[in-house]
Image (cartoon, rainbow, N blue to C red):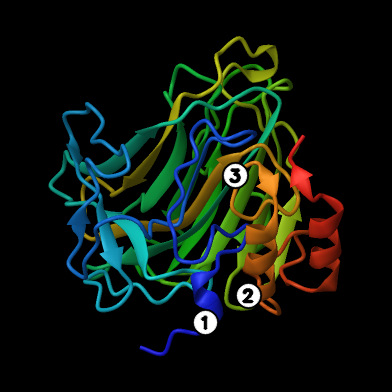
Amino acid sequence: MNRQPWKCSLGWGLSVCAALVLSGAAGAEYASDFEGLDASPAGTLLTGQDAYYLPPDTDSVDWYAYTYDGNVLQIVDNPCGGAQFVGGTGPGDGTFYARAQRDSEWGGGVWMVTYDVTGQYLGAPPSADNIGSFSAQPFPGSASYIQLLNWTDPDTAEEWNARYIPYDAGGTQFAPPYASAGPEWEGLPINHWYRIRTWIDFDLNRITQVSLTDLATGETFTAQPDGWYLEGGEAGGFPTPTGFRFFAGSGTVEGNSAVFDNIIIAPPCPGDLDGDGTVNTADLLSLLASWGTPCGDVDGNGDTNTADLLDLLANWGDCP
């Protein structure tokens, strides 16, 4: 495998090839590139590693930590990845789904959730919805939402949509086909990595901005959705989340797989590429190692260049 050197440096990008668990760090709650986990081509149990656990649903099976090299899910290298990722596959026995959860206190004000994600199908078409999701937890019961991966056409299972399940102003959860940020978020090829960012304003109880970056090309699409609320709608009234959950599977068809890499849940801070609450030398080195790729992008245009370097230097020091 011919991995380019910058592949070990993540955009918004955690320190080179190292997993970071940042609970308690100033201005940040959690960040990981999953490099510190025990992983294998066949998958090593994620439950019990880095405080991940199987949620107490009776219809849950585990997620696993995989190496990119030789992985059984046949997931291609993430252009902004290191050597490892996490994933779940629905067993499709009619009742069970794959889940992994981690407790993580989210503060008030504005927060940003960032992760790299793609979908995969290991069976013979047709498949069935859904592929997988990321959700703030508890859901329901907090100022939560779901970011969903579902099939563009389950009969072919070749493309997926990056949709959301928010609430409207009155507090009613969006129903199928759920919420789309635009046509650029539809018909995404499976086994192709994208970076999704979601800005959340807990004071407004809203999702205020979302962006999607193709990690192979750097093409980026940003939207400010109108009327996407967290649980409780415009009135709010729910506490901030206390964790998050990865999910995979349709419940009826075996082989729907969702995989994630490079997650950061933290208040937004331009230039803080590793999510540790400080813009410092580690972030500078990460940006320089990602030059000319989408991986160290600070200003959200899908490229790492002089503008990003200037933004990073202008925000040097502790995040607000």
Residue farthest to the bottom, as pictured:
2
List x then y, in percent, for residue 316.
79, 51
The percent position of residue 209, horizontal first and vertical second, equals 72, 43
Rendered view: 263 above or below 72: above
State the residue at coordinates (36%, 49%): 130
| Residue under pointer 3 | 276
Marks 3,1: beta carbons within 8 A: no
Could you say which quadrant of the image residue 303 lies in?
bottom right
Q: Nearer the viewer, residue 128 or 18?
A: 18
Q: Residues within 10 Å of mark 1 (few under 14, many from 20)?
A: few
Residue kind at label 2, given as amino acid type: Ala
Q: Is residue 58 above or below residue 154?
A: above
Q: Residue at x 73, y 71 (%)?
A: 304
| Residue at image mark 1 | 5
Q: Which residue in the protein does label 2 denote?
A: 289
For the residue marked with disc 1, what is the amino acid? Pro
Residue at the extreme left? 93
Compare marks 3 and 1 and give the one earlier in the sequence: 1
Please state which amino acid type lies under the numbered disc 3: Asp
